Each structure stands twice: as structure tokens, then as C-alpha cells.
Amino acid sequence: MNTYITLLSSDDYILPLLALNKNLIDLKSKYPLFVIVSSNVNTKTIDILKEHNINYKITSPILYHSDIIKQASQWGQSQVVNTATKLEIFNTSFDKAVYLDADSFFIYNIDNLFNYPDGAMYEECGCNGGFSGLFTFMPKNHNFEYYKNIIQNIPILDGDLLANLWFPFKSNPEYRIPTEYFLNITLDNLDNFIDTVKGFHFCYKYKPWNYKSVKDFNNDFYNGLNKPYSKLRTAVVETYLERYILDFSKKI
């Protein structure tokens, strides 16, 4: 069985996760979304997954090395602490999976990502660097306990571990998922991709689901980051809010 898979390590991410699930359904994906749920997530959140017929697996959190936890606290990024639990995706029995960060949004069907080989990874910003927010993998080819041991005993984030340990995309173009599949919403040149874009990643601290309108989002985003205005960014956030987030926020 093939599947999309994501991580839910915080109750704060239930809204974008519901949006991602409906987004994939609306785009007529052939594959369901499966969720790795950290056991620190409350029962109300689990009930919401059940109500929306989203399959999941509850697992104990995987903790980072103490140095990473300390740094996250110092930087005010406490949400990072539980993201090592992402490694549980390798402790599954799917034939093939595409991992997506929960704060993703797509405007075209992306099922063709399953045609990429095991270990294909999103090529961040068109450079020669990978990003672990979108990648393909076959669980049987990976040693979950080995990855878990590294993350707990060496001060390294899950993204750095995966990008540097086993993804072969740097030496083989067949393993590089093009930039337009997962555009960083903060890119200065976002409008250059208006004719080719397939999906977005709502990275950084300005999360659309924390706003009631695109105007409120833009006020914080542009004042906080001093970025050039983007028609594409505004249109995407407006669609994401109106079609998904605002509707779900009324129901949960």
C-alpha cells in the first residue's frame, strides 16, 4: 500500500493537518493521508482525526539530544522538541510513502511523486540543498532503530540527519524533487514561479491558520519580514484560508 504520511506532534497543528487532508482529497489523489501522532497530543485532537476518517498511529515521542532541546528553548522554538518523532514514519509497513510536512498546500495533484525513487528529496530553493519537509521513501529499506539512536545521541535535527545521512539527491538528479513542488512561502522571488508552481510550504513563524483574513496575515508578514509584495503569496494564503482553514476552525 502507498500513502502520504505526516507528523502531528502538537495540538496546534490539527487545523493545517485537516486542511492538508482535504486538499489532497480535493485534488483527487489516489492515496490517503496517514498520520504519525505523538502521544502528547490530547484526546480531543485524536477524536477530530477519527471524525474525519484519517488513519493514524499513536507513538511515544522521540526526544532529541539534550543540546538540541536546550537550544530550542533558548530560541523560543519549543515546538521543535517533538519533531524527532517524525522518524516513526520509518517504523511502518507501507510499500512506499511520500512524507509531507503538515503545513503544506498544493494546487495540483502530486501523485506523480510516487514515481520518484526511494530517497528522492525536495530540492530547496533550486540550490544543491535538500529539505526534509517533502521526500519519498520505502520503509523496508530503512533502519528505524539506527536513525533513532543517532537522533537521541548526537545533537542533530531530524532534517539535517535525513538530508545528510542517506538521501543521494546531491549526486543524482533523479533523486531531486523540483523546487516548484514545495515553494517556501517566504521566497522573495515567489512570483517568478507563478506558471510552474505545484505546492507551497508555510514555513517560518507566520502561519496562515493563525489569522482570520489574508489582510491580517499580510500586515504581520510584510511588517515582520520586510519582504517584497507577492501576488502569488496573497492569492495562495487567501485561498488556503477561505477554502480550508476558516471552515474547519468553525467546526473544531
Image: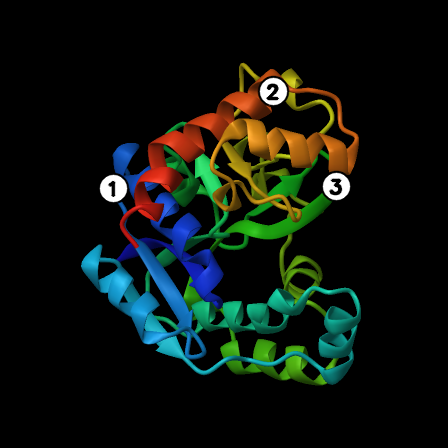
Quadrant location, the N terminus: bottom left
How far across and down, in percent of the image, does residue 12 sit? 48, 60
Q: Determine which residue is flagged by label 1.
A: 30
Q: Name the residue located 64 percent from the left edge and 18 percent from the top edge.
A: 191
Q: How many marks?
A: 3
The amino acid marked with disc number 2 is Phe
Q: Earlier in the sequence, mark 3 or mark 1?
A: 1
The type of residue carrying mark 3 is: Asn
- Residue 242 visible: yes
- Nearest the viewer among 208 and 123 is 208
Q: Is residue 232 above or below residue 7?
A: above
Left or right: 240 as drawn, with respect to 82:
left
Residue at 63% from the left image edge and 72% from the top image edge: 81
Q: Dividing the image into 4 quarters, which one contains the C terminus?
A: bottom left
> Residue 193 bears which disc, if any?
2
Q: Is residue 27 above or below residue 119?
A: above
Residue 69 falls in which quadrant of the image?
A: bottom right
Q: Position of residue 52 (x, y in %)?
A: 22, 55
- Residue 221's label in the rendered image is none
Of pointers 3 and 2, the one earlier in the residue sequence: 3
Question: Judging from the image, what secondary structure is the residue with disc 1 in?
Answer: loop
Q: Which mark is residue 128?
A: 3
